[in-house]
Amino acid sequence: MNATSPAAPTGRIVLLTTSHRVAPGLLSWPAWQVLHAADEVLCADGAHPQLPYLREAGVPVEEASPAAEDLVGACAGGRTVVVVATGEGEPALTDGLARLAGSGRVPMPELELLPASYDLPGARLLDLVQVMDRIRAECPWSSRQTHEGLAKYGIEEAYELVEAIEEGDRDELREELGDVLLQVIFHARIAEEHPEEPFSVDDVAGGIVAKLVHRHPHVFGDETATTPEEVKEHWLRTKAVEKRRASVTEGIPLGQPGLALAAKLASRVRTAGLDVPLPRGEGIGYELLGLAVRAEAEGTDPEAALRAAARAYRDAVRAAEGVGE
């Protein structure tokens, strides 16, 4: 070829990636366009979940795993070759193409990475459900757990989450949120096995979605709310209709820490507009009750306030002991 001859077209390689978290066959329109226009479509995995849908759509796919040099050669003359990537993403092929391009010895075709499907927000939750299914089936410890046996871990993880929030540690916060989420997924997985009243994590999610939509008529309905106080009014009104409770104390878990319990009772009383004098009695319990009610009225969480004071006390103890952070 002399200096005036046009360069031969080198073609195009398209690496098509898909997400296993999206149902096979649900590909983007640019992906379908490329697949139908390609001169050749290759896939190394004959069991790839996308292949039946591609073939049904009239896209011929050859099961092959060419080396980088062979793939470049297949593009000669301006041809377009699409490689449907496996779950690993074809690292050997992409490394080989990078070496060829870096050598400068081979005219390289145009290289394109085309995501044919991609994860939506929350997609990794599907991975968590799948992992939990396998652990429940195969782990000697997890397969024997019950709701009752796991209850203590739910309490522990909730406290550790609160501690991460109060400490302001972002890495710990992310990790503890994951631990709390695990408890939800674990309990939902166990619930699937109930012989008479099973339910799944989808039932759990569906229930809370319905509740949130119903209790936010100012977002999903015709109501209006411009202040947090108006939002709380909507919430309490719809909740009261749902629960039809005879007493404002119904639904308050008595097993929670004492200061939190006292503050919750005081909040219900204040919200309902009731005038209920504190019970008279001797001892520190009644004094703490009065302090908790006062804190709630002033907008202070007595549990959080006491924990903050306790941490300061802990620091003072360590300082007295000569123990560093």
Image: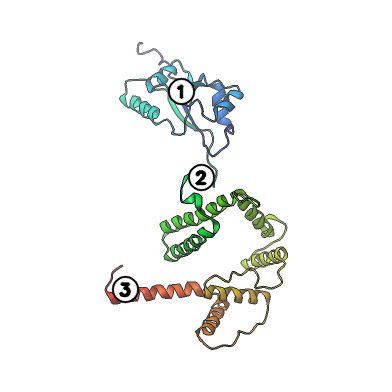
* Kind of residue indicated by mark 3: Arg
* Kind of residue indicated by mark 1: Arg
For the residues labelled 2 and 1, the Cα–Cα distance comes to 46 Å
SS for dot 1: strand
* Kind of residue indicated by mark 2: Ala
Q: Relative to 129, is 69 above or below?
A: above
Q: Position of residue 155 (x, y in %)?
A: 50, 63
Pointer 2: what residue?
137
Q: Position of residue 77 (x, y in %)?
A: 45, 15
Pointer 3: what residue?
318
| Crowd band around label 2 with a 10 angstrom C-alpha radius: few (<14), some (14–19), many (20+) | few
For the residues labelled 3 and 2, the Cα–Cα distance comes to 46 Å
| Crowd band around label 1 with a 10 angstrom C-alpha radius: few (<14), some (14–19), many (20+) | many
Q: How is the image coloured?
A: rainbow
Q: Residue at x 73, y 65 (%)?
A: 241
- The quarter of the picture where the C terminus appears is bottom left
Q: Relative to 27, is 12 above or below?
A: above
Q: Relative to 178, is 90 above or below?
A: above
Of the image marks 3 and 1, the number of the one nearer the N terminus: 1
Residue 12, numbered label? 1
Q: Residue at x 43, y 25 (%)?
A: 110
Q: Horizontal placement of 142 versus 193: left or right?
A: left
